[in-house]
Image (cartoon, rainbow, N blue to C red):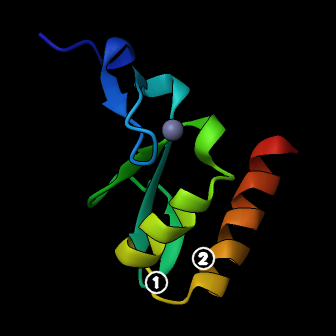
Amino acid sequence: MENEMKSIRMCIVCKKRDYQKNLLRFQCKNGKIIKFSGVGRSFYICKECINSKKLIKLLANKCNKDKENIKEQIKQISFSILH
Ligand SMILES: [Zn+2]
């Protein structure tokens, strides 16, 4: 039986495994990175990876080919996490 609070998930950037509650959960919708809405596919990112260059590359492949757009979106996400 899976306990939601103890679920282990993996950061898509560094592949580190951690409890689901310690990771940030997002999804990609129409070229936008959004917080997971509860529907559709999602992915996890650990807090240490939010500013990594590898994340930009990964999300450019996954979500939106425009890297500058991805950078801007990540900037806004990390701002909203830190403030
Ligand atoms: Zn990570």
Residue at x 58%, y 83% (from the top left corner): 67
Q: How many marks?
A: 2
**Mark 2 or 1, nearer chain start:** 1
What residue is disc 1 on?
Answer: 64
Which image quadrant is residue 3 in?
top left
Residue type for callout 2: Ile
Image coords of residue 12 (percent x, y): 39, 47
* Crowding at mark 2 (Cα within 10 Å: few <14, some 14-19, many 20+): many
Q: Position of residue 5 (x, y in %)?
A: 39, 15
Report the amino acid beneath label 1. Answer: Asn
Query: Vertically, is 57 above or below 42?
Result: below
Q: Residue at x 60, y 76 (%)?
A: 70
Instruction: Using the image as rendered, state which of residue 47 and residue 80 is in the foreground.
Output: 47
Count residues near mark 1 (Cα–Cα under 10 Å), then give few for <14, some for 14-19, many for 20+: many
Q: Which residue is mark 2?
A: 70
Q: Quadrant of residue 49?
A: top right
Query: Which structural element holds mark 2?
Result: helix
Q: Position of residue 24 (x, y in %)?
A: 53, 41
Contact (Cβ within 8 Å) of mark 2 with mark 1: yes
Q: Is residue 23 left or right of residue 41?
A: right
Q: Residue furthest right?
A: 83
Determine which quarter of the picture holds residue 39.
Answer: bottom left
Q: Residue at x 83, y 43 (%)?
A: 82
Helix, strand or loop at label 1? It is: loop
Residue 41 shown left or right of residue 52 in the figure:
left
Query: In whole angstroms, how far apart are the C-alphas of marks 2 and 1?
Result: 7 Å
Residue at (61% x, 61% y) in the render? 53
Image quadrant where one finds the C terminus: top right
Q: Quadrant of the N terminus?
A: top left
Residue in front for this viewpoint, 6 or 18: 18
Q: Which residue sits furthest left?
A: 1
Label ID, residue 37:
none
